[in-house]
Image: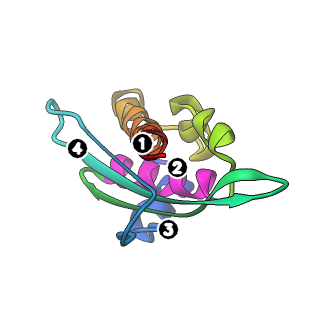
Amino acid sequence: MYSRKVIEHFTRPHNQGVIKNPSGTGMVGNPVCGDLMKIYIKVKKDKTAGEFISDIKFETLGCASAIATSSMVTDMAKGKTIDEAMKISRDSVAESLGGLPPIKMHCSNLASDALHAAIEDYRKKK
């Protein structure tokens, strides 16, 4: 039912935790399944690369898919420019995990939505 990559990210999540004084924070939830995700980003500016995500962490309450997609989206976004990170989609998160069961696809929606919300929060603070 779950790919090896989903199981890896669920049992040993990457980038789990909190960033003190984050550049942006995004929180999303799904009242139907009860999943709740919070993503913290730290943004740095580079003369050549522009604004990029130098650090990213997450806190997630939810099922295996919710935790795995949170872990994967943080791996995908770390080191990317803000514009590149905004292009991370629900489909790209699911594909990077080797797919998700159709009934769990909403979890990848939450992960990318939480990332985008953190970026939007950062942009509002600028």
- Where in the figure is residue 117, as x and y percent of width and height? 40, 38
Look at the numbered discs 3 and 1 and tell me whether their residues touch, using CB distance below 8 Å. Answer: no
Q: Quadrant of residue 96?
A: top right
The amino acid marked with disc number 2 is Val
Asked which colour scheme the image uses, the reply is rainbow
Q: Are marks 4 and 3 in contact (CB under 8 Å)?
A: no
Query: Residue 49: x, y in percent?
Result: 80, 52
Per the model, the C-alpha gap separating discs 2 and 4 is 16 Å
User: For the residue labelled by badge 3, is the local secondary structure a helix, a strand or a loop?
Assistant: loop
Crowding around mark 2 (Cα neighbors within 10 Å: few <14, some 14 to 19, many 20+) is: many
Is residue 36 toward the left or the right of residue 10 in the image? left
Q: Earlier in the sequence, mark 2 or mark 3?
A: 3
Q: What secondary structure is marked by label 1?
A: helix
Q: Does 3 lie within the magenta span?
A: no
Please report contact status of discs 1 and 2: CB closer than 8 Å, yes or no. yes
105 or 16, nearer to the observer: 16
Which residue does the numbered mark 4 point to in the structure image?
A: 35
Q: Which residue is mark 1?
A: 111
The local secondary structure at tag 4 comes to loop
The residue sitting at 66% across, 54% down in the picture is 52
Q: Residue at x 60, y 51 (%)?
A: 77
Q: Amino acid at mark 4?
A: Asp
Residue 114, placed above or below residue 38: above
Provide the residue designation for mark 2: 73
Magenta-colored span: 64-78
Give the mark, 1 or 2, whose residue is nearer the N terminus.
2
Task: Tell me residue 115's x, y (percent).
Answer: 46, 44
Residue with the mark numbered 3: 14
The answer to whether 35 appears left or right of 20 in the picture is: left
Identity of the amino acid at label 3?
His
